[in-house]
Amino acid sequence: MFDGIPIVDAHCHIGYFGGWANVGITSEELMALNKQFNVVHSVVFTQPNSLTAEAAKRYPRNLTGYVWLNPFDGDKAISELHTAVKEWGCKGVKLHPLFQAFIADDPIVYPIMDEARKLKIPVAIHSGHPPFSLPWSIGELAEVYPDVTVVMLHMGHGHGLYIRAAINAAKRYPNIVLETSGMPMHTKIKEAMETVGEDRVMYGCDIPFHHPSVELQRIKMAGLNENQLRKILHDNAVEKLGLIF
């Protein structure tokens, strides 16, 4: 589909997610799917975090683990962060304001951001669902921590107003990087590349909630040139997330 560009997926999960979602994938199934679509490396975060640690240890050339933290855990979250980075080799933090019911820029998040700044690791944050995970709140958090790379997952997700807000926030705060998974408008991918910057938009799939055949098709239809395609599919994730594989 992309003339041999080795693809990096900045957003995927393993394990089973019950309830309304009722989806799941094993690390072995993820490896097979990635091979089919020429995805050479994936950033993975899931719960429990032990699944991430095990998968990243098993496939070190193919997976980079992020630790999924709950700010309400307080000191426990900070301890888990240090364990994940120092013992498990995790290279970033995942926050899910909607899943765990906190506002992205609430001061309860600050201790985690403080540690991420000290460790010089990125923080990936779910966006696109009120009232907790709105792009405006993520932008305000990025403003407080201009020296932390903030990955706005889904770049606003499925609501046109939130997509616009995600792009506007990224234009305003240079430490925000937009990730594309689940965002339905291929035209907004091109707009983000042209207005936010070609080096601050990256491909993600959000496996198993979405499928690469769909997510990559949206990238294909965005009307990007060859250089932009290589950036969004590979280079930006490697550079902004500090991936080594």
Image (tube, rainbow, N blue to C red):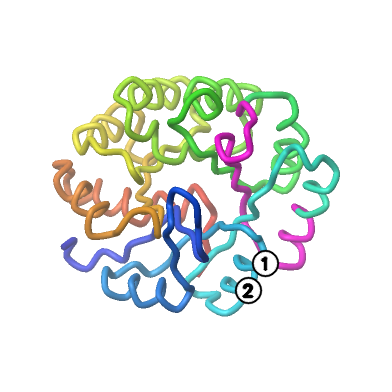
Above or below residue 175? Residue 213 is: below
Q: Whole-percent x and y of residue 220?
A: 17, 50
Above or below residue 182? Residue 89 is: below
Q: Whole-percent x and y of residue 71?
A: 73, 38
**Left or right: 219, with 232 as reference point:** left
In terms of depth relative to the viewer, which is nearer, 140 or 16? Answer: 16
The residue under the point 74% across, 24% down is 107
Would you call the spot at circle 1 few (<14 residues within 10 Å), some (14-19), or many (20 or more)? some
Q: Is residue 85 magenta?
A: yes
Circles 2, 1 touching at the beta carbon (< 8 Å): yes
Above or below residue 224? Residue 67 is: below
Q: Which quadrant of the structure image shows residue 60? A: bottom right
In terms of depth relative to the viewer, which is nearer, 60 or 154? Answer: 154
Q: Please give the residue where the numbered disc 2 appears in the rendered image.
A: 54
Q: Whole-percent x and y of residue 173?
A: 50, 24
Amino acid under label 2?
Glu
What distance separates the C-alpha of mark 2 from that of mark 1?
A: 6 Å
Numbered label attached to residue 50 = 1
The residue under the point 37% across, 41% down is 201
Q: Is residue 103 magenta?
A: yes
Secondary structure at badge 2 equals helix
The residue under the point 47% across, 34% down is 127
> What span is colored magenta in the figure?
81-104
